[in-house]
Amino acid sequence: MTVAQIRKHLSQFTIAIAGCGGLGSNAAVALARAGIGKLLLVDFDLVEPSNLYRQYFFCDQIGTFKTDALAENIHRIDNSIELETKNIKLDELAVIQLFSDVDLVIEAFDQAAEKQMLLEAMLVNFPEKPFIMGNGMAGYGNFEAIKQLQWDKQVYICGDFTNEISEDNPPLAPRVGIVANMQANLAMELLLKMSK
């Protein structure tokens, strides 16, 4: 397929990004550059100075909602992409309300409890909808350990499944970016096999 054909096909689809930090912001930008039609950006956090080391934000956006800052940055790349932002903390009810009409969901949370809540909500309410998670991207090096696997019929996981974030093992831009781009690449692969 040519770039134009890929972009035309992807323009029909909507992807939800749950969490707009290191994984979510970088995955969203990659998908925007590829030509996705619509992104639903969901997060409740504000941009902080420490976010600039690995997230797709800029100094003048510190203190703004991540969803709004990310939408601004994406529209600077391609203002034809439809963007919807929700400045909320996701719970199961919000998952049901927000994700019913999207074609695919990318999980990009930091906390294990949030990941678990979203996984369970997706399995119960949208078992046929493709769902891509991130797990294990902290630290640096060990590139060969990063991979993707299919965990369930429609659930995929990208990462090394080992290196969890901690004070001594922080999330750094290179590995976070690799996993975020793996999530975006997998999303494209799945959507390019789907018809609308």
Image (cartoon, rainbow, N blue to C red):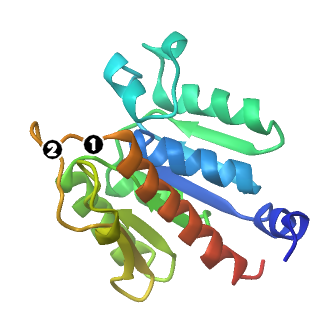
**Residue 104 coordinates in the image, percent (x, y):** 56, 67
- Residue on which disc 2 sits: 169
**Residue 15 coordinates in the image, percent (x, y):** 60, 59
Whether residue 39 is visible to the viewer of this picture, yes or no, is: yes
Indicate left or right for 58 with 148 as reference: right
The outermost residue toward the bottom is 153
Please state which of residues 136 and 82 is positioned toward the viewer in this rendering: 136
Q: Quadrant of residue 134?
A: bottom left
- Name the residue at 68% across, 41% down: 83
Q: Secondary structure at mark 1?
A: loop
Indicate left or right for 189 with 196 as reference: left
Indicate left or right for 61 with 6 as reference: left
**Residue 183 coordinates in the image, percent (x, y):** 49, 63
- Residue on which disc 1 sits: 171
Q: Is residue 190 above or below residue 93?
A: below
Please state which of residues 7 and 182 is positioned toward the viewer in this rendering: 182
